[in-house]
Image (tube, rainbow, N blue to C red):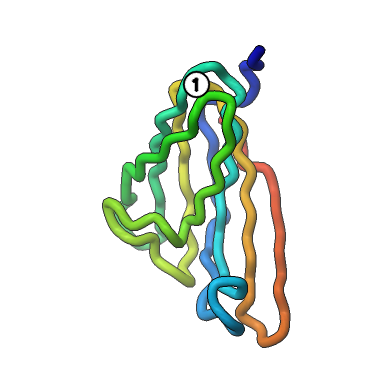
Amino acid sequence: MSQDVGAHVWVLPGGHVPFPAHGPEPAFTGFDQLCVLNATDRDAELRLDVYYEDAEPVGPYRLRVGARRIRHVRINDLVDPEAVRLDRPYGCVLRSPVPVVVQFLRQDTRLPGVVALTGTMAYPA
């Protein structure tokens, strides 16, 4: 039995992939990450558009989350249609044909010997 929880549009205005990292890869790689829960009985074919303060938006990045599944996507790993720019402010809008729930995580390892991890919910529009 599935639950239709979540929203069709999610907004994340405060993205910023931390770079450079200090420490061994991959454990100490800084990243931004979207965590998506699809609790419906239908696959979610997501569309993600990335916005910058001084450049035109880039996208869509296409992501799939299966029915009754979760998916964690590092923003750093998005390369098609182009790599998301590191160490630069961005915002993004995620659209889904089915309701999903989106959480945002950041791992910041720019300071030697320090791993800062933070998380928040994206904004459901």
Quadrant in which residue 11 is drawn: top right
Q: Where is residue 59 in the image (x, y as percent from the top left)?
A: 32, 46
- Up/down of 26 relative to 68, above or below: below
Tell me if 93 is positioned left or right of 35 in this view: left
Q: Residue at x 55, y 59 (%)?
A: 32
Residue lying farthest to the bottom in this orientation: 112
Q: In which quarter of the image is the N terminus?
A: top right
- Up/down of 9 relative to 13, above or below: above
- Up/down of 114 relative to 67, above or below: below
Quadrant in which residue 14 is drawn: bottom right
Which one is in front, 28 or 34?
28
Q: Which residue is drawn at 67% across and 87% down?
A: 112
Q: Residue at x 48, y 52 (%)?
A: 91
Q: Which residue is drawn at 39% across and 60% down?
A: 84
**Can residue 124 be seen at all in this image of the molecule?**
no
SS category of the residue bearing label 1:
strand
Which one is in front, 119 or 11?
119
Q: In which quarter of the image is the C terminus?
A: top right
**Can residue 103 be seen at all in this image of the molecule?**
yes
Q: Position of residue 40 (x, y in %)?
A: 57, 19
Which residue position is annotated with label 1? Answer: 98
Q: Which amino acid does label 1 sit on?
A: Val
Specify few, some or many for label 1: CA neighbours under 10 Å numbering under 14, 14-19, or 20 or more. many
